[in-house]
Amino acid sequence: WASRLSPGPAPMSGGNISLIDAGGPDETNSHGHDNSYDLASARHSIEHAIAAAKLLGKESAIGANWSSIVAALPSAFTYGRGSDGRTIMRCWGNGAGGDKKLCNGIGVLMQRYPLNMSRTNVLNDTVHAANLDFYPSQWRAGNSMFWSMFTIGHNGLGNHSAADHFLAKSLDGFLWGDFKIWSEVHGGGGCPNFLTGGGIFLQSVWAGYAGLRYSDDSLQIHAPRLLPGSDRLRIRGV
């Protein structure tokens, strides 16, 4: 990451550091500059490398500029306005001349879960709530993986009715046939037996409704609640 991050004025965001020509988690609109998920991943990776070096007594093995890179990274994130005028985080930098690269927002949402990015100066609850309201319109077809991120996000903010709505949306039309096989595309198309859909459904249960979160030094449980129509939720092996 340190070798890919360029110092100096960021051509995309207007900050003082840039990540040029890297792919994000949105497969449809991949590769561009200053992808927000990549920037968040870079920050986590470099911070953990610095911490690991200190624990091992190998501070001399890390780059002399790594700490300054971490400090500069918040300036590379790009923000804009949703249709309701609220501040949202953009997936990509704005680009020269105001050009904006399209995205479905999955990488923006994934910064809160699983990356646990909640620093006040990068992605606070107000911006996160605006992101959750704005990005469903950017991929109206969606798939089970996409809609489950809204389930987890809304549960995390205590928006229970919205979380339940997106849970139903993540299931409806994505389980098909007599054996209820997961599909990538609504109605049974795309990748057959879409295990990614099953995996993110499980995450919407334990991370969304059970409220489990892992940090560097703890396992946390935030406001657990039952799934709609259920009378118990048991998490084993924690």
Image: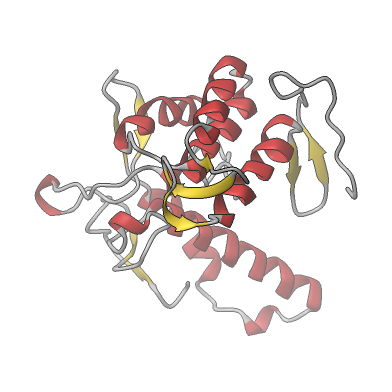
Q: Position of residue 18 (x, y in %)?
A: 33, 62
Quarter where residue 61 is shown: bottom right
Rendered position, 112 above or below 231 = below
Res. 8 visible in picture: yes
Q: Is residue 218 left or right of residue 44?
A: right
**Which residue is depicted at the point 55% across and 65% down?**
67
Rendered position, 165 above or below 192 = above
Quarter where residue 108 is shown: top left
* In front of the other: 214 or 20: 214
The structure's colour scheme is secondary structure
Rendered position, 133 above or below 196 = above
* In front of the other: 162 or 13: 162
Rendered position, 42 above or below 129 = below
Q: Is residue 115 left or right of residue 150?
A: right
Q: Position of residue 65 (x, y in %)?
A: 50, 72
Seen as rendered, the residue at the extreme bottom is 61
Q: Position of residue 50 (x, y in %)?
A: 65, 69
* In front of the other: 60 or 23: 23
Seen as rendered, the residue at the extreme front is 178
Q: Is residue 140 left or right of residue 234?
A: left
Please count the marks in the image: 0
**Which residue is depicted at the point 85% across and 40% down?**
235
Q: Position of residue 224 (x, y in %)?
A: 78, 26
Q: Is residue 20 left or right of residue 214?
A: left
Res. 72 visible in picture: no
Seen as rendered, the residue at the extreme top is 161
**Which residue is depicted at the point 68% across and 44% down?**
202
Seen as rendered, the residue at the extreme right is 237
